[in-house]
Amino acid sequence: MQARNYVAPSSIDEAVAALQAGNGANRAFAGGTDVIIQVRENRRAVDTLVDIKSIPELIGITHKPDGGLRLGAATPCAQIYRDPQVKARFPALVDSASLIGGVQIQSRASLGGNLCNSSPAADSIPTLIALGAIAEIAGPSGRRNVAVEDFCTGPGQNVLQPGELLVALEFPSPAANSGAAFERFIPRNEMDIAVVNAAANITLSADGSTFQAARIAIGAVAPTPLYVAAAGQALAGKPVNDDSIAAAAEAARAAATPITDMRGSAAQRKHLVGVLVTSVLRTAIDRARG
Ligand SMILES: Cc1cc2nc3c(=O)[nH]c(=O)nc-3n(C[C@H](O)[C@H](O)[C@H](O)COP(=O)(O)OP(=O)(O)OC[C@H]3O[C@@H](n4cnc5c(N)ncnc54)[C@H](O)[C@@H]3O)c2cc1C
């Protein structure tokens, strides 16, 4: 099946109306790097593709006076990782955005599309969760905010209701002495779907010796990307050393409920969770210490 119609609204209200008119059969179209393939391969029945890239609020990067960041939902990955302030202040976003596909894909693909596609293996979602991102949603009943860790509800499923549109992702200002990082494991050095991925965002004491707070998220090891609160709790108040990192990695391993498939066994994935969480924590510590 092919999508039968295409519209390109220029405002959020028009986009919401166009999505609502389909009663679930019309879909937002950002970069199209997921949805076009799904339509072509008959994996998703779509009546009308609602191109959201002509809506000014959905494209762009805003660095807010309080140090926070706002990303229009359809902003391409390449625009994000080329932004000097994103590079300096949100390097974990660069880690994720620069791994999604190759340069051609990154020139179209958005983090909003990555989130709304809601793959358990999506390469931006653990980073969005670790950074405490909030999804701003517009719909027929107005606007609402959802923490990204609560956004995905199952493979390819999320909290968006018919007629709703992701408008932006909002990030709080990075805390003093904080650092964040994302990594994934793929079985080859080409584009591939993550066997496991992980992100960490940590805040250290002023002297860099103690963890004050941490947010850790893992992907491809459960029906949705997972926020592992217990892994962060294992670090809070603990010295920055191998034992603390090992305790957080073990908490993340315990939270993972992977399956065995063509990309890896459940046992390998459990093992990789520990490896990747350890690695992203070490990078995050280095970044926090400047
Ligand atoms: C060759 C190739 C390599 C890839 N490599 C990777 C990879 O390494 N890692 C990875 O995670 N992904 C990868 N992908 C998948 C894809 O590129 C990403 O998921 C991308 O971020 C999707 O963004 P998009 O803007 O193209 O989304 P689209 O395809 O436009 O949309 C994806 C889904 O989200 C919905 N949607 C999009 N925006 C909104 C919105 N604002 N509000 C409501 N719904 C919305 C659409 O209706 C659709 O269901 C790859 C894809 C290809 C083709």
Image: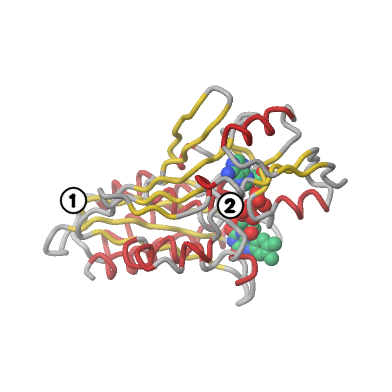
Quarter of the image for the C terminus: give it.
Answer: bottom left
Say which mark, if any, is on residue 237: 1
Number of marks in the rendered image:
2
Q: Earlier in the sequence, mark 2 or mark 1?
A: 2
Local crowd size for mark 1, using a 10 Å CA cut-off: few (<14), some (14–19), many (≥20): some
Say which mark, if any, is on residue 121: none
Say which mark, if any, is on residue 114: 2
Q: Is mark 2 within 8 Å of ligand 1?
A: yes
Q: Quadrant of residue 154?
A: top right
Residue 35 at what x, y percent from top left? 71, 50
**Helix, strand or loop at mark 1:** loop
Q: Quadrant of residue 12?
A: top right
Local crowd size for mark 2, using a 10 Å CA cut-off: few (<14), some (14–19), many (≥20): many
* Outermost right residue: 1
Labelled pair 2, 1 in contact (Cβ < 8 Å): no
* Outermost front residue: 10
Kind of residue at disc 2 = Asn
Residue drawn at x 40%, y 45% is 170
Residue 131 at what x, y percent from top left? 37, 51
**Helix, strand or loop at mark 2:** helix
Residue 225 at what x, y percent from top left? 52, 48
